[in-house]
Image (tube, rainbow, N blue to C red):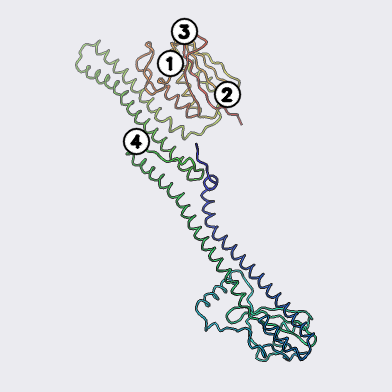
Amino acid sequence: MSKPRSLWFGHWTLAHRILAVNLLTIVLLACGVLYLDAFRNQLSEERLGLIRREANMSAGALAVSPREARPKVLESLARSSDSRIRVFGPDGRLVADSWQTTGPTYELRDPNTQKWTKDAARAMDRGFNILVGATPLDDFIEPEKDSLQAWPEALQAKASKTAVTQARNAPDLTPVFSAATPAADGVVLLTTNDRDFTRTVRSQRRSLFVAMALAVLLSVLLSLFLARTIVRPLRRIALAAHRVRLGRAREVKVPRLPSRTDEIGLLARSISDMSQSLRHRMDNIEHFAADVTHELKNPLASLRSAVEGLERVQDPELRTKLLAVARNDVVRLDRLIGDISEAARTDAELARARFEPVDLGSLIEQIVGAWEHRRETGDARLAFARPRKDTAVILGDPGRLARAIDNIIDNAISFSPSGGLVEIAAARVGEEVRIRIDDEGPGVPEEAREAIFNRFHSVRPESEDFGRHSGLGLAIARAIVEGHDGEIDVQDRDDAPSGARFTIRLPATELA
């Protein structure tokens, strides 16, 4: 039962994961900054709206109050709102000030007398304002001569006949909100140093910083998790690759990481397949080297024996026989070395070959014509059922395909009886092209049908000249066919009393 894959492992590439981790903190920071800026702006608008309403209420209350009761009303309004209320007459002179009766209802604090923590908070305020691009507020300074002309919002309210608000910064960067509204006989101005506003904003900012700290912690944990999901499997792959390079272990298990569908999973499976292919190739090289050594020893031993005999034998007839043996051994060695070289080059050349469309009907026709022209078929006859032109087309290397088919025809001719018929046919069947080569020989025993494709398989007909075949022909043919993503097998014929049927299956293609 396979393990369920999470979204993180199943669909996200490494680039996506790294980008997500790197962007997480930035996105959360941006969201937090935008939220805090929006919160502060909304809170500021609410406070300005509140002081505007208080200014209008104060102007209305003063307008309906008897003149002698106005100081008490002014005092009551100032205490209830913790603000300072000024009343300016029609000529702009200050006619009433709530602080004359209530005393100061707020205090503008000197930042030089405060603790360092307040300096740090103000530095953070300035940094936040720069970050969000907030418009700097004017500094609040009490005028030396308190008159209507010293307050721009009061002048604007008198001119526009509507309430006007304004926000300024106190020396300690707490806001001072003011609202001026026209009255029956002048202008009413309210000012207040709203320290609660700053405490509320800074409290929200602290909460945001706590959230950001958690986000950074989460980002670090995710980064560590990401490093684990990348570094640990890469280390396992690297160690396995190092063991493969050392070559001390016969079998090195490279982790395939089947649950990973990202680049690391692809890398793991690619290296695993590469190591298996390398191990298989090395095993083949070892077996091939052992087989070559074994096959070369026999003709060399025979040649050596013949040469040594020539030194001792004086009989002309016997010397002639020994020279014939030596000549046959040299021919056998030459053929064997040529076929060994061909077998060794096959895999490498197929890996580099550029495949092209090949019409197997035309190719086989040329091969059959060459056999008949050389007249090397002996008593055997060749018959080829040529398919329609451009119907048996595959992608491949024409030279290598010709060698594979030629080897099988050669094998069929060598096993054919005197006057035997070798039938060759090619046709497209579905998505593949099938080549069939039938002979009338003894056939291939079922237990040997796989072995005949091994290198240096040496079961040959008794009538064949010694050393004519190296035992590599069918092995080369299979390597070429498999190099073209095809298959080759041998069965007994079902339409004759005896004989073998070699069948080659290759993927078909269409001519452009």
Residue at 70 percent across and 75 percent down: it is: 50
Mark 1–mark 3 Cα distance, whole angstroms, equals 26 Å
Q: Residues within 10 Å of mark 4 (few under 14, many from 20)?
A: few
Q: Which badge, 1 or 2, comes first in the chain's sequence? A: 2
Q: Is label 3 in a helix, a strand or a loop?
A: loop
On residue 250, the disc is 4
Q: Is label 4 in a helix, a strand or a loop?
A: loop
Q: Is residue 230 left or right of residue 138?
A: left
Q: Residues within 10 Å of mark 3 (few under 14, many from 20)?
A: few
Q: Which residue occupies the foreground of this view, 244 or 106?
A: 106
Q: Is label 2 in a helix, a strand or a loop?
A: loop
Q: Which residue occupies the foreground of this view, 505 or 44?
A: 44
Mark 1–mark 2 Cα distance, whole angstroms, equals 30 Å
Mark 4–mark 3 Cα distance, whole angstroms, equals 52 Å
- Check disc 2 and report the residue beneath it: 392
The amino acid beneath tag 1 is Glu
Q: Residues within 10 Å of mark 2 (few under 14, many from 20)?
A: many
256 up-or-down from 468: above or below: below
On residue 446, the disc is 1
